[in-house]
Amino acid sequence: MNKAVFLDRDGVINNDYGNYYISDSKDFKLNPGVIELLAWLKQEGFLLIIISNQGGISKGLYSLDDVERIHLKMNKILMPHGLKFDEIYFCPHHPENEKCICRKPDTLMFEKAVSRFAIDVKKSFFIGDRETDVEAGNKAGLKTIKVEANQDMKEVLAELKKSLYC
């Protein structure tokens, strides 16, 4: 079975300071230390999977195409470093407009990834910056790490190295 790191996108991978919804690829900027974190995780054999709520689609604030453009930009930034996400799952729904079972803190996006990639949840974890991320990770049976929004991921990397190998 595989091991994976599930990561929230906005606030963890990219900076969302001052923008609750990142809807334009020109506003997409990686948080400090993300490349170092992802490179180390990949080197350690983890699959890299994004799990993200993108309720702005349902609210009409941006489109599915906007989200895809952001993901293309993210991959272009990571590619020169030999990095890419194994998969990106996102929920386009918002509770103001509809009910769903994919939006965090529910676990459908995690369940899809676990099934598709034969992931051992006991060897995997989730990194998020909101309480709904913590709740979702716990419900999915993952070790869950809550970070500060837009935190330097080098700090997280140092903690991970300590906790995984001490």
Image (cartoon, rainbow, N blue to C red):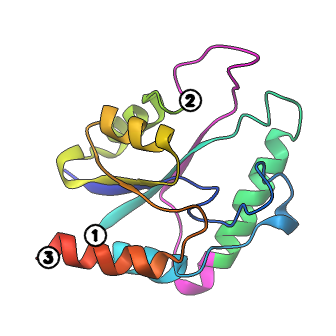
Look at mark 1 in the image and give the residue it sits on: 45
Q: Residue at x 27, y 53 (%)?
A: 124
Q: Rounded to the nearest whole Å, what is the CA distance between mark 1 and mark 2? A: 27 Å
Give coordinates of residue 17: x percent, y percent.
Answer: 74, 63
Highlighted magenta segment, given as a residue range: 78-102
In the image, what residue occupies the spot 34% across and 46% down?
Answer: 117
Label 1, label 3: how far apart the Cα atoms are: 14 Å
Q: Nearer the viewer, residue 54 or 82?
A: 54
Which residue in the structure is indicated by mark 2? 103
Image: 16 above or below 135 = below
Res. 24 mark: none
Q: What x and y, as percent, mark residue 115?
A: 33, 35
The residue nearer to you, when weighing 80 against 61, is 61
Depth-wise, is mark 1 or mark 3 nearer the camera? 3
Q: Which mark is residue 165?
A: 3
Q: Residue at x 75, y 51 (%)?
A: 68
Q: How many numbered circles does the render carry?
A: 3
Circle 2 SS class:
loop
Q: Main secondary structure of the magenta part?
A: loop
Question: Is 98 contained in the magenta span?
Answer: yes
